[in-house]
Amino acid sequence: MRTLNDWILRFSLSWPLFLLAAAIAFGSIYVFTGVIEPRFVAQTGGSPPFDLQNRLTVEQVYAQLPTYTDSARQLYYLFAVIDFAFPLFASLFLAGIAAFSLRYLWPRGYDWVTARKLWVLLLLPAFFDWAENIFALTIISAHGHELRGAAMMMIYSKLGKLSLTLVAQVLAWSLLVLASGKWLWLRRSLHKNN
């Protein structure tokens, strides 16, 4: 855990690393939605990849799976390769924002979180995303066998990913807004005193 925590802090302290995380995260989103999804939808008769369907049910999984042609499966495998990198860099991006903002906003709070190595909790959405990917690949590769338990675990993993991502986003962006407010208030106070 210490290594992961330190890695998050490096991304919050280094603009090049932070911008790398942002570029990979946002670039992945573009590839998912702008490149792969339209081609995938065209090959499956209208179904986007499972990962891009937030209200997916087990019944929908098995209704859509027969439309996964060999070409669609190849696109999904490409999607999955990228989706193993995306959650890590998206989490590092949000964790970097949170750590940077808290360090400025409340240094003692930052030290407390850092000493307890709690920054790693902001990687939890990535772990759930990876689990979702593993279950999706298992289902897609099952070749006609219905693995309803795996489909259910994919959906639970998706729900965990979505819930924890929302928490991470609210935390990161709220800290950034508060830190920006503090910066503006201090800047305005300095101008009034001059």
Image (cartoon, helix red, strand yellow):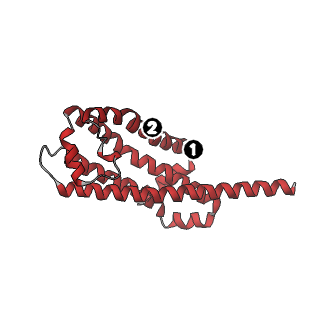
Which mark is drawn over residue 27?
2
Residue 95 drawn at (x, y percent): 50, 54
Relative to 7, is 133 on the left or the right?
left
Q: Which residue is identified by label 1?
A: 15
Residue 14 drawn at (x, y percent): 56, 46
Secondary structure state at the residue bearing disc 2: helix
Which mark is drawn over residue 47?
none
Relative to 9, is 51 on the left or the right?
left
Q: Which amino acid does label 2 sit on?
A: Gly
Kindly tell me whether residue 150 is visible in this rendering.
yes
Disc on the earlier residue, 2 or 1: 1
- Residue 85 image-quadrant placement: top left
- In three-dimensional space, the C-alpha distance between marks 2 and 1, rounded to whole angstroms, equals 17 Å
Residue lying at 24% horizontally and 57% vertically, measured from the top left? 152
Residue lying at 22% horizontally and 44% vertically, measured from the top left? 64
Residue lying at 58% horizontally and 66% vertically, measured from the top left? 109
Residue 43 drawn at (x, y percent): 26, 32
